Amino acid sequence: MQELIDSLMKSKGQELIGQLTQKLGFSNAQGEGLLGGLLEQLGGLFTGGKAEPSQLLGGDLSGLMGNLDFNALASKAGVSAEQAEAGVKEVGPNLMSEVQGMMDGPDDLLKMVTGGDAGGLLGKVGGLFGKK
């Protein structure tokens, strides 16, 4: 999963944060907090068995939205829960599209989801933004 997160942040991180700042008025730090928290939660959903890999490959954002903790995302980003939800709806489709483009099929996703140190995901995501 860490490989997927690193790749997403490298290829699309600034673009997704830009969407949040330009369209929803988030600050850069708020955008980073929301995106980092979102990736962290998505990783936890898949490694914890609360979401099926087919949801990610199929682009089923609506099915994943119900499993996200918007209060926790809001806390990470320093915004309201409503703003966090709006932010996920804003960047979600592009994020899902990028993930789909990185995968050849379910085997690739399963390898990325189960192949790394899922327990250290929280610290690794924080490390992307210079926080431990």
Image: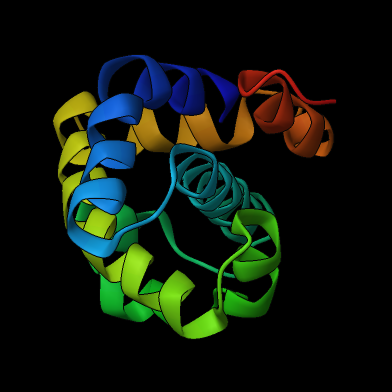
Q: Is residue 59 visible?
A: no
Number of labelled discs? 0
Q: Say which of 69 and 106 sits in front.
A: 69
Residue at horizontal 54%, vertical 37%?
113
* Res. 109 image quadrant: top left
Q: Say which of 48 and 127 sits in front.
A: 127
Q: Say which of 17 and 125 sits in front.
A: 17
Q: Which quadrant would the C terminus be assigned to in this image?
A: top right
Question: Residue 87, image x and y in percent?
Answer: 35, 64
Question: Residue 75, image x and y in percent?
Answer: 70, 65
Q: Up-down: is 44 above or below 28?
A: below
Residue at horizontal 31%, vertical 26%?
14
Question: Residue 114, image x and y in percent?
Answer: 61, 35
Q: Up-down: is 86 above or below 59?
A: below
Residue at horizontal 62%, vertical 46%?
40
Question: Residue 79, image x and y in percent?
Answer: 56, 68
Q: Which quadrant would the N terminus be assigned to in this image?
A: top right
Q: Is residue 10 left or right of residue 81?
A: left
Residue at horizontal 59%, vertical 56%?
77
Say how the picture is coloured: rainbow
